[in-house]
Amino acid sequence: MTDSEWWKSAVIYQIYPRSFQDTNGDGIGDLKGIERRLDDLKALGVDAIWISPIFPSPMADFGYDVADYCGIDPRFGTLADFDALLAAAHARGIRLLLDLVPNHTSDQHPWFQESRSAQDDPRRDWYIWRDARPDGSPPNNWISDFGGSAWEWDEATGQYYYHAFLKEQPDLNWRNPAVRSAMLDVLRFWFERGVDGFRIDVLWHMVKHVDLPDNPVNLDWTPGQPDYTRVHQLHSTDQPEVHGIAGEMRAIADHYGARVLIGEIYLPVPQLVGYYGTAEQPGVHLPFNFQLIGAAWNAPGLAKMIAEYEAALPADGWPNWVLGNHDRPRIATRVGAEQARVAMMLLLTLRGTPTLYYGDEIGMEDGEIPAHLVQDPREIRDPGIGLGRDPVRTPMAWDESPNAGFSPADPWLPLHPDWIARNVEAQRGDPASMWRLTQKLLFLRHEHRALALGDYHPVDAGGDLLAFERRYEHDRLLVVLNLGDTPQGFAIPEWAEDFTVLASARGGHDPALLSPNEGYILG
Ligand code: GLC
């Protein structure tokens, strides 16, 4: 394998920087904190980190509202801190990915400030401005992903502007070549500094239908479902022209070499795989595959999902899997503490690049955020139906010192109350812990090409069992997972009869009879 394809065998670890490690005592994590924790990440075995946005931002959406794409928010540090972090990561063989937010800027970005200053401002067309309908209502029925109309009336210049998220996050007009070229320069800026790639925020949102027609109304919508699902986002997302943009970004990444682009895309598999692009015009290297985040957690369902995804991949498309991120409930909360171990084993044995969310390696669960401490604008705008993301963004629990070693000050969000028992230091010392299991799995991925790069072949198992082979040349491994909470017998295939247990999710020794929530890697 050439080094330019390091991302195929790598394990990516997502850091939500506000919540990882504070060093300056403001209760918010920072870049120096990430640097301080690199050795812990190295000990765990991660190959690359992706850091959620660290650019100057009014923090209306905690950094996903960028006011300057080429700087560092003072809350997180300075450009010098960033350079030091990057050098320190590289010195340890850890690659670093940034989070590019090209669909929208902050309303405080100078581009938007100029754009909103007058209808004839040269930057007016950098954003999506439209007249009101004759009755004064918004130009169409599009709904913000965070609830309410996606159009905001601007009194001063007498037009509406479009925002797929908060009104503080106006959408850029990617049909304007000047916008393209300015944002592509941002990629170059960070590539020149040495970053190894980008996770691209809401890639499928970037281009809208040129005529901005009404979206079809969702006739099945019922109260309690997210407001934005009142309409199908047919015309506001996933337009064919987006692939040209992904292609331009890819060409820049390829120019620098050995870089990776990962697209955040929430779409059904047939559309998702389109974001790999074609041989003539490659798209992103990895269109994020979020299926494990939403999947019903049972063996036949997961087996079918894996098979369908594998079958849908284009010839050169490399798969990837994600169990959690800063927007969705944590895996340990979704499937329970015991099954979370099986889920980790699944994530780290499937074919494709895995992305781990910080805290999942110690089995962190969603925190409970009292009403007066709610921070997430999504919860504030569309409350009470479980959309709030604060619970999955609580500070990392490092040790049993005050505030779990996260910060000397009160953290910006409360720690999960179980941190005294559930923290990295405690788990590093406990051979049966989730951290140690994760470390072992990452070690095996580095040890066995079959796990990192091998083929995937399903194995018949039945009941609550999910089994598959991973094979790379002569290296063959068998993975069998009990997705249920009853014991399950497993007929070990002949070719694996002599295999020994390389790892087990719960410390068992008998792959012919799996305890509840047990899983094995045999080889
Ligand atoms: C992405 C981010 C999310 C953010 C949104 C708007 O979905 O993951 O956190 O709120 O984009 O930028």
Image (cartoon, rainbow, N blue to C red):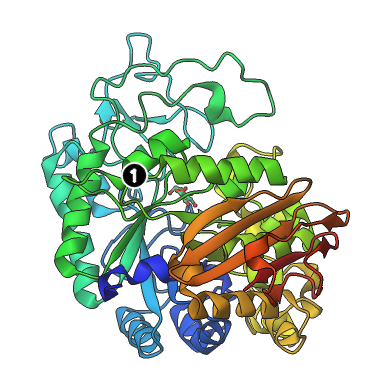
Residue 448, image x, y percentages: 50, 76
Name which residue lies at 38% across and 65% down: 8
Decide if residue 179 is in sight here: yes
Under mark 1, the amino acid is Pro
As drawn, the residue found furthest toward the front would be 494
**Quadrant in the picture for the N terminus:** bottom left
Residue 106, image x, y percentages: 35, 51
Left or right of 120 on screen, residue 341: right
Q: Is residue 483 above or below residue 24?
A: above
As drawn, the residue found furthest toward the right would be 486
Name which residue lies at 32% across and 49% down: 105
Q: Which residue is mark 1?
A: 314
Residue 69, image x, y percentages: 28, 61
Between residues 188 and 390, which one lies in front from this camera angle?
A: 188
**Quadrant in the picture for the C terminus:** bottom right
Left or right of 100 on screen, residue 230: right
As drawn, the residue found furthest toward the top would be 134
Decide if residue 365 is in sight here: no
Q: Is residue 430 above or below residue 252?
A: below
Between residues 256 and 121, which one lies in front from this camera angle?
A: 256
Residue 65, image x, y percentages: 40, 53
Between residues 152 and 226, which one lies in front from this camera angle?
A: 226
